[in-house]
Image (cartoon, rainbow, N blue to C red):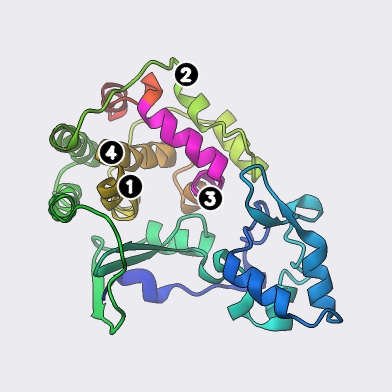
């Protein structure tokens, strides 16, 4: 299998208890089946086994989760902001989400793409302040390709199109021109993939970012104190757009919706412009939205249904 990673991936290192916004606080963590089977095998007399059993429950999506402690802290996060489960039974036996965060992993048959998310403040700093264009490291492993039902021709088409999208972002033009061209490119590509119906919901633009599930109150303050202004032609804005293109573009092979993925890249730059212009702001949005199933489902719907997020409205904001 071919493994693809951004060149900065190797620079990421979790800072654990020193983190300014712990991933162990604010959201629920699913207990995956493999981890649950291991917990069942633990000696019932172990304190960690008893603690695990006490906090397992179900969420509204029928996922098995760990019930949060006060202040939305993971029940295993101790006073030093370290994980008691990791200490007691090893990091390899923590839930899959904990073992992999802030990494994301996408398998496309013989290719696995791995990256890190803005939802981690350390990762956000790395990506936001990247010098130069986004580049990738590749390696071959002995692992067999993953089973999938993706259409090979669609995947090849999208992979070529994503490379074109990166080239558009890397042009020697103002970022607003590049983003406008990127939207036009995505509209044409979407026409080739299938129909895309936009609009119908008259939601005001900034209401799109008032997520129903609030993880960090600081994000709500960001939205309330937003400032509409022109987009700066900075490397950070290119880095943000490139992040979304890398993370989401090829997922269109599953739903044939490439336009929403490109809209996310444009909106990511607007988020940075209107809400803060720093890595922390993009981190807060990502933690609130990309890592909340409820908020992300709403956001995906609004990308297609909200008039304020249609192509015309977004292009009007590219000033």
In the rendered view, does 42 fall on the left or right side of 287?
Answer: right
**Earlier sequence position, callout 3 versus callout 1:** 1
Which residue position is annotated with label 1?
237
**Earlier sequence position, callout 2 versus callout 3:** 2
How far is the residue under mark 3 from the one under mark 1? 21 Å
SS at mark 3 in the image: loop
How far is the residue under mark 3 from the one under mark 4? 20 Å
Residue 188: image quadrant is top left
- Which of the pair 213/231 is nearer the observer? 213
Which residue position is annotated with label 3?
291
Closer mark to the observer between disc 2 and disc 1: 2
**Earlier sequence position, callout 4 versus callout 1:** 1
Residue 139: image quadrant is bottom left
SS at mark 2 in the image: loop
- Which of the pair 145/217 is nearer the observer? 145
Which mark, residue 203?
2
* Magenta stretch, residue numbers: 284-304
SS at mark 1 in the image: helix
Where is residue 237 drawn, in percent x and y?
33, 47
Who's the residue at 38% across and 15% down the image?
200
Magenta span contains residue 295: yes
Evaluate whether residue 274 shows in this view: no
Does residue 200 lie above or below 311 as drawn? above
**Earlier sequence position, callout 2 versus callout 1:** 2
Q: Please tell me how crowded label 4 is: few (under 14), some (14-19), or many (20+) other residues with Cα within 10 Å.
A: many
């Amino acid at each position: 299998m071919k493994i693809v990673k951004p060149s900065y991936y190797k620079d990421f290192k979790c800072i654990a208890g020193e983190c300014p916004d712990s991933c162990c606080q604010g959201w629920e963590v699913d207990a995956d089946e493999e981890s649950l089977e291991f917990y069942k095998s633990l000696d019932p007399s172990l304190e960690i086994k008893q603690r695990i059993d006490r906090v397992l429950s179900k969420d509204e999506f029928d996922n098995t989760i760990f019930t949060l402690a006060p202040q939305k802290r993971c029940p295993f996060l101790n006073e030093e902001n370290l994980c008691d489960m990791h200490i007691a039974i090893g990091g390899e036996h923590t839930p899959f989400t904990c073992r992999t965060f802030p990494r994301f992993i996408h398998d496309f048959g013989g290719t696995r793409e791995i990256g890190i998310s803005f939802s981690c403040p350390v990762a956000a700093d790395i990506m936001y302040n990247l010098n130069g264009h986004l580049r990738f490291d590749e390696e071959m492993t002995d692992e067999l390709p993953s089973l999938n039902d993706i259409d090979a021709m669609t995947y090849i088409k999208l992979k070529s199109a994503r490379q074109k999208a990166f080239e558009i972002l890397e042009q020697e033009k103002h970022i607003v021109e590049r983003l406008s061209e990127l939207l036009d490119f995505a509209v044409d590509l979407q026409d080739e993939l299938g129909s895309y119906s936009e609009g119908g919901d008259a939601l005001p633009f900034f209401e799109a970012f008032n997520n129903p599930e609030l993880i960090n109150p600081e994000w709500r303050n960001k939205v309330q104190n937003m400032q509409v202004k022109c987009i700066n032609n900075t490397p950070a804005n290119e880095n943000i757009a490139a992040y979304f293109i890398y993370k989401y573009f090829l997922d269109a092979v599953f739903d044939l919706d490439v336009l929403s993925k490109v809209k996310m890249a444009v909106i990511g730059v607007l988020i940075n412009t209107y809400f803060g212009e720093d890595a922390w702001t993009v981190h807060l949005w990502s933690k609130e939205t990309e890592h909340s199933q409820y908020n992300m489902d709403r956001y995906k719907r609004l990308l297609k249904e909200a008039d304020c997020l249609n192509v015309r409205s977004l292009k009007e904001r590219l000033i």
